[in-house]
Amino acid sequence: MFPLLLVGCLYPDEQRKENQPPYEDQLQSVQHAVTQYREETSVLPIKTSEADTPILRKYPVNFSMIVPSYLQAAPGNSFENGGIYQYVIVDPEAAAEVRLIDLRNVKAIQELERKIYQYRSEHEFAPVDTVIGNELLKLDHEKLNYDEAPVVESPFHPSHRLPLYLQTDGTVVIDYSLDILYYVEEYGLGDFEEGDDLRWLLVEHSPFVPVNSIPQTIDNGEVIFLEE
């Protein structure tokens, strides 16, 4: 039997000092470099992405454009330096704030998608338990030889384990309902309203972005997935 899918066990070097919190200093140093580069060149130091790249991953920081003139080196916890985080820019037209993607979650999703693809190749259908709406499917974890339903660790709250769902196009998404509810209770909706995409509430109050996600909101106190 495969072990429960937890991102915490996927990277043997994840306990390296540079991969561990606090990462605020590293984040701020990159933010300063990005801001300075933009002020001097009127463009952002970003890598080119495909047009259909999800918005929260669309603008990765291009360290080759800011190192060494604006930043001595890419942070030790960055993917470019062997770390577990990818630095990305959100709101590029305005504040251009730097955030982090936890690549352990990305790797976990890729591994699960690989197993689903393999299962479909062998059985000609997906390992689905139930349909939960909005073109989302709950996986039958036993068919994938998991003892329990696969989850990933939340970057937004240390005790949250987030469910994974399969979309009809074959991609896996993370359900951030627990994090959204926690942030609403902790910070309130602020400038957001019920019906708005509340993934941006997570981005506003955290150094991370909710990777592998689809829009979610609150309706009558319950977090739901928005129709895209």
Image (cartoon, rainbow, N blue to C red):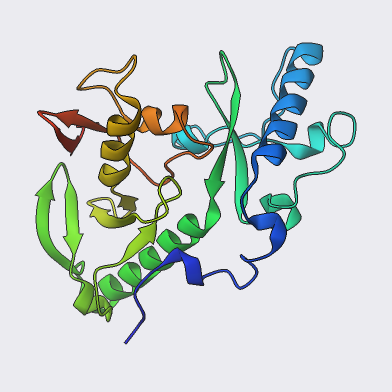
Left or right position of 137 against 102 = left
In terms of depth relative to the viewer, which is nearer, 7 or 20?
20
Name the residue: 72% across, 36% down: 62
Establish if 221 lies above or below 37: below
Establish if 54 lies above or below 114: above
**Residue extending furthest toward the front:** 186
Name the residue: 49% across, 61% down: 107
Establish if 110 lies above or below 222: below
Left or right position of 41 against 108 = right
Name the residue: 79% across, 14% down: 41
In terms of depth relative to the viewer, which is nearer, 123 or 136?
136
In terms of depth relative to the viewer, which is nearer, 5 or 144?
5
**Residue extending furthest toward the bottom:** 1
Residue 29 screen position, x and y as percent: 75, 33
Residue 84 screen position, x and y as percent: 61, 56
Establish if 138 lies above or below 195: below
Residue 93 screen position, x and y as percent: 56, 14
Q: Quadrant of residue 38?
A: top right
Q: Quadrant of the N terminus?
A: bottom left
Name the residue: 61% across, 73% down: 12
Q: Quadrant of residue 109?
A: bottom left
Q: Quadrant of the C terminus?
A: top left
Residue 189 screen position, x and y as percent: 29, 22
Question: Number of labelled discs?
Answer: 0
Q: Quadrant of residue 123?
A: bottom left
Left or right position of 81 against 177 = right
